Image (tube, rainbow, N blue to C red):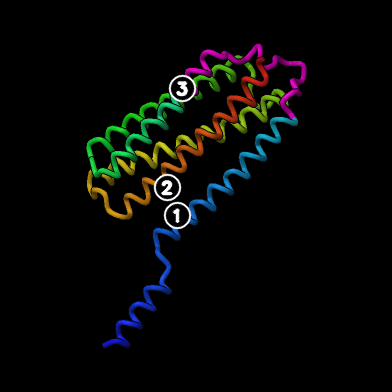
């Protein structure tokens, strides 16, 4: 009997925890994503002054509009944070409310970004016009794509919370989405500072 218990304990000790391994894998993914954004930031810093005789940031960007866009994403992150606090208390309705608010604010951010891109392209300031615009569209567009995938993930998590409740798997996925969402906030603060404020002030 004792040998059986010892072998079971040893097997459990050797068996890696699946959720912990998934979290570790997600941290590795975030670090690789950080490298991608670092490269895009470096590219923008190198090419950001190459206007090719065209307009620069002061002619193209509207700071109040961009500030409103920024506040949408930051407030979305706060709403998600409240949802995570509610998850610790297993309040399903509060979690869903936090996710819905975070989703709507994030979607507003994406819509504003698409509107900005559309306006620039329709005015003849597309990514092919200069090194500045190429690096701008690459950096900001990559971030916007990440936010869009984050919104898709958030929609899936709403469904899982409604159908499965707070299982260990759902909790783990909500935690990973939280890391992803706050990571995108941090990246956007960098984008807003380097791409917009630094160029406009």
Which residue is painted at 40% across and 36% down in the image?
Answer: 151
Image location of residue 29, percent across then percent down: 53, 50
Image location of residue 74, percent across then percent down: 45, 27
Q: Which residue is mark 3?
A: 71
Which residue is painted at 67% across and 25% down in the image?
Answer: 133
Residue projecting furthest to the front: 2
Indicate the secondary structure of the residue bearing disc 1.
helix
Q: Which residues are magenta?
A: 47-71
CB under 8 Å between discs 3 and 2: no
Dot placed on the residue nearer the N-terminal end, 1 or 2: 1
Q: Looking at the rendering, which quadrant does residue 20 occupy? A: bottom left
Q: Would you call the spot at circle 1 few (<14 residues within 10 Å), some (14-19), or many (20 or more)?
A: some
The answer to whether residue 56 is magenta is yes
Indicate the secondary structure of the residue bearing disc 3.
helix
In the displayed structure image, the side of residue 150 where residue 191 appears, left or right: right
Decide: is 7 above or below 63: below
Residue 107 visible in the picture = no
Which residue is painted at 67% across and 40% down in the image?
Answer: 39
Q: Residue 176's mark?
A: 2
Dot placed on the residue nearer the N-terminal end, 3 or 1: 1
Q: Looking at the rendering, which quadrant does residue 123 occupy? A: top right
Observer-nearest of 171 and 56: 171
Q: Quadrant of the N terminus?
A: bottom left
Indicate the secondary structure of the residue bearing disc 2.
helix
Image location of residue 169, percent across then percent down: 33, 54
């Amino acid at each position: 009997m004792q040998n059986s218990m010892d072998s079971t304990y040893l097997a459990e000790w050797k068996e890696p925890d699946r959720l912990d391994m998934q979290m570790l894998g997600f941290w590795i993914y975030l670090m690789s994503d950080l490298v991608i954004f670092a490269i895009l930031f470096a590219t923008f810093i190198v090419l950001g002054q190459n206007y090719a005789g065209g307009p620069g940031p002061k002619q193209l960007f509207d700071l109040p509009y961009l500030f409103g866009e920024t506040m949408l994403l930051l407030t979305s992150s706060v709403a998600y944070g409240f949802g995570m606090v509610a998850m610790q208390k297993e309040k399903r309705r509060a979690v869903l409310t936090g996710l819905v608010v975070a989703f709507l604010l994030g979607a507003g951010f994406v819509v504003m970004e698409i509107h900005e891109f559309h306006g620039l392209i329709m005015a003849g300031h597309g990514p092919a016009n200069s090194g500045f615009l190429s690096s701008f569209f690459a950096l900001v567009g990559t971030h916007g794509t990440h936010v869009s995938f984050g919104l898709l993930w958030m929609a899936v998590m709403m469904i899982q919370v409604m159908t499965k409740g707070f299982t260990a798997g759902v909790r783990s996925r909500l935690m990973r989405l939280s890391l992803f969402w706050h990571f995108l906030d941090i990246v956007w603060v960098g984008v807003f500072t380097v791409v917009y404020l630094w160029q406009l002030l």
